[in-house]
Image: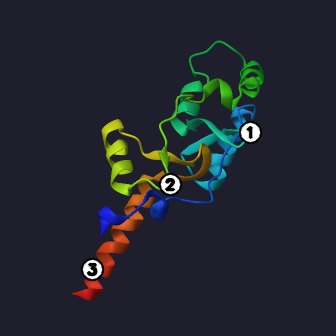
Amino acid sequence: MLSQLKVSDLMTKSVISAQPDSKLSAAKALMKEFGIRHLPVVEHGVLAGIISSGDIREAAPSDATTLSVWELNYLWDKLTVGEVMTRNVVSVDANEPFIDALRIMVARKFSSLPVVHQDVLVGILTETDVFHKIIALAEAEMVQA
């Protein structure tokens, strides 16, 4: 059964995204509001990058700085998603076999993959999506037993 699944069968279709010129603080707030760790970045409808909560943490100022809180806030407010995002994004097509996407995720140690169709972002496949499908399959198997 798993071998017959396509990425589109598991992906989250209502994907939340940002634009490269979005403020990094806005992206952080969006991720917190929706409880997500990865935010695809779209420019003119095309996938341009991806930003993770780890990327945002790395861009945040260190506690060891000598800058004042006002200086820190000023600098933080200047950062954009485009300055921090990963540009060369590994993505998968919605019609690819799910197992191929899973192999990429495991080999690259990714916890998510943007899903595209003809370069347009159509979803995101996360490890949570994979876990939900495995649970659903296991529960269906238990009911049949």
Provide the residue designation for mark 2.
Answer: 94
Asked which colour scheme the image uses, the reply is rainbow
Q: Nearer the viewer, residue 5 or 143?
A: 5
Gap in angstroms between the C-alphas marked 1 and 3:
44 Å
Amino acid type, label 3: Glu
Question: Disc 3 versus disc 2: distance between alpha carbons?
Answer: 26 Å
Q: Which mark is residue 44?
A: 1
Read off the residue under disc 3: 141
Cα separation between marks 2 and 1? 19 Å
Q: How many marks?
A: 3
Q: Dot 2 lies on which element?
A: loop
- Which residue is found at the position 46% from the left and 65% from the top? 9
- In this rendering, position of residue 139 left or right of residue 132: left
Of pointers 2 and 1, the one earlier in the residue sequence: 1
Residue 14 on image: x %, y %: 63, 59
Outermost residue on the bottom side: it is: 144
Residue shown at 50%/59% (left/top)?
Answer: 11
The image position of residue 54, as x and y in percent, is 51, 35
